[in-house]
Image: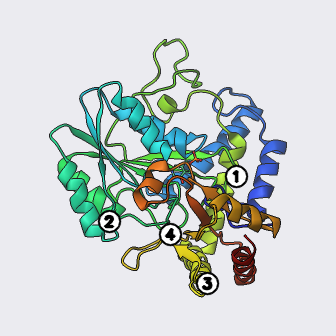
Amino acid sequence: MVNFDNAATTFPKPYSVRRAAAAALRDYGGNPGRSGHDISLAASEQVYNAREKAAAFFGAEPEDTVFTLNCTHALNFAVKGILKPGDHVIISSMEHNSVFRPVYALASKGVMYSIAPVSADSSITLKNIMREITPFTRAVVFTMGSNVTGQLMPFAGIGRLCAERGICFIADGAQACGVVPIDIGKDNINFLCCAAHKGLYAAAGTGLLVSDGKFRLRPIIEGGTGSTSLDPEQPDILPDALESGTINTVGAISLSAGIDFVKNTGIGNIFSHESELCAIFISEMKKIKEVKIYRSDEAKYLPIVLFNIEGVLPEKTAGFLNSRGYALRAGLHCAGLAHRTIGTLPDGAVRFAPSVFNTADEVMGLCRAVAQAVKTL
Ligand SMILES: Cc1ncc(COP(=O)(O)O)c(C=O)c1O
């Protein structure tokens, strides 16, 4: 089976990541940060190394780098930790439910929200955000790149406009981390939410919330942190404030190897290899008149291509491709808002999302399978 559903989670993982995860289970089974005995300390050291590496990768401090279970957890921590009744928040018209649902849930508790339309032209997207700003705007929560169309958003521009106005910028980096360079300081990102199991090739169940330390979050989960145990209140120092409960040690150690893999391969090389595979796919699909691709010449894209075969349900296309050995995700991709924006409701579309491990031959095989699907379905 060839996996072209890497936007959901990357698979396969690099050999070094698999080896690190196996070593974590074999050699570092203690609970990190909980005890002074050697088994716990060995795990603590590994987790700290991973934290330091992740922090450096995004230009942050280790203590401002929090392990989460996934990007959804990171986004919930940031969105619910910063917004209070009476606050206003701006999101984009291309958000994943991991942004839209927490914001929507807060709307019933007195938080107001606006949806800024995304344009193919970055300067218009920035103007659309500015138009929504009110004196109550506390945060902008924006995807860095759409998981539906792959459209890359002007995140550095958004960061700048937020910084100039003292607005907190929460960036959904689920699809961008590991594929485009990100420096939270230079990009003025106050909270970067990351699905480390995607572009950083960590094990499933690994995410990150990386902050620049300028805004404080109220914790939304309280519990054991291995620190200040007599105090009934959650500690307010990071990362403890946001890291209640046992950490996913296997995930953290796999992340450390994943970041090494991305650094050694070169983020630019990863982006250009995957983008080249997208270019091959697009140029082959353009030869089939029944295939519609959801891209604009004006916009910039992450290596993701959304398409449909005219008159064929996306689920049927993906089912056919699965039967030919190609894994692609069809439907709404947990982003009904984004599909509404691009006009693909109610059935959605099919998403092609390569990883660094896919080859041009595999893409050509997929293109032949799509051509067969057009004839067969
Ligand atoms: C843009 C975007 N945001 C958030 C998420 C949620 O990520 P996770 O599955 O790690 O919670 C995803 C996952 O596909 C995504 O693509």
Instruction: Give the number of the disc on residue 288.
Output: 3
**Mark 3 or 4, closer to the camera:** 3
Q: Position of residue 210 (x, y in %)?
A: 46, 47
Label 1 Cα neighbours within 10 Å, binned few <14 / some 14-19 / many ≥20? many
Instruction: Give the number of the disc on residue 188.
Output: none
- Residue at x 49% of width, y 68% of height: 180
SS category of the residue bearing label 3: loop
Q: Left or right: 80 with respect to 29?
A: left
**Disc 2 to disc 4, C-alpha distance:** 15 Å
**Disc 1 to disc 2, C-alpha distance:** 37 Å
Who comes first in sequence, dot 3 or dot 4? 3
**Vertical arrangement, residue 296 with respect to residue 283, above or below:** above
**Mark 1 or 2, closer to the camera:** 2
**Disc 3 to disc 1, C-alpha distance:** 41 Å
In the rendered structure, are the residues bearing label 1 and label 2 in contact, judged by CB atoms less than 8 Å apart?
no
Q: Left or right: 358 with respect to 217?
A: right
**Disc 3 to disc 4, C-alpha distance:** 23 Å
- Residue at x 64% of width, y 70% of height: 354
Q: Amino acid at mark 1?
A: Ser
- Pointer 4: what residue? 302
**Vertical arrangement, residue 33 with respect to residue 168, above or below:** above
Instruction: Give the number of the disc on residue 119.
Output: 2
SS category of the residue bearing label 2: loop
